[in-house]
Amino acid sequence: IQARGANEKLTIGLIGSGNRGRTIASECVKAGHRIAATADCAKFRLDWINEQLAKAGQSEKPTAYTDYRKLLDHKGLDAVIVATPDHHHKEQLLAAMSAGLHAYCEKPLSHTVEQGKEMVAAVRKAKKVVQVG
């Protein structure tokens, strides 16, 4: 894994723009990173996240997707934030690893030990950094 310098800025995709997703993405923008794409199944949240990112200081609107799998194909992403309801975390993290993206995933990471083991194996295979918070 090649580490980035502390001053390098990331291009991020946000999966789930509900309350937690908006909060985390806004903090990323305030830290100087760019949210290039957002995915949510509810259009009103995709509209609302644009307002929140603008308030946080991002001038460009991210590309909006209603299917997170299309977001994973967005060119130029360094990482994704997974801030969806708990039962989606496993599927979305595995998909992010398959797409070759680093990830931040909200807790809980998994619902069972078996799911957790599968996720850890996928992260190790992809050689990506994953943080759970």
Image: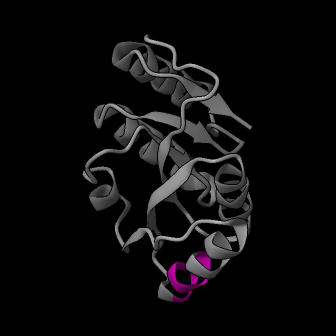
The stretch of residues the image draws in magenta is 44-49
Q: Quadrant of the C terminus?
A: top right
* Residue at screen point 62% across, 28% down: 7
Q: Quadrant of residue 111?
A: top right
The quarter of the displayed image where residue 63 is located: bottom left
Residue beneath the point at 55% across and 89% down: 44
Quarter of the figure that contains the N terminus = top left
Give the residue at the far bottom of this rendering.
44
Where residue 104 appears, as percent x and y from the top left, is 60, 39
Residue 82 at x, y = what percent?
Answer: 56, 50
Residue 48 forms part of the magenta stretch: yes
**Does the magenta run of residues contain 14?**
no
Give the left or right position of residue 5, taking residue 80 as reference: right
The answer to whether residue 68 is left or right of residue 21 is left
Magenta region, mostly helix, strand or loop? helix
Instruction: Give the camera-side residue of 36 and 89.
Output: 36
Give the total number of marks visible in the rendering. 0
Front residue of 23 and 88: 23
- Color style of the picture: one colour
x 51%, y 14%: residue: 3
Q: Which residue corresponds to the image point at 54% horizontal and 38% vertical from the top-left?
A: 9
- Above-or-below relation of 63 to 5: below
Q: Quadrant of residue 58?
A: bottom right
Measuring from the top left, give residue 100's x and y in whole percent: 32, 31
Q: Position of residue 43 (x, y in %)?
A: 47, 86
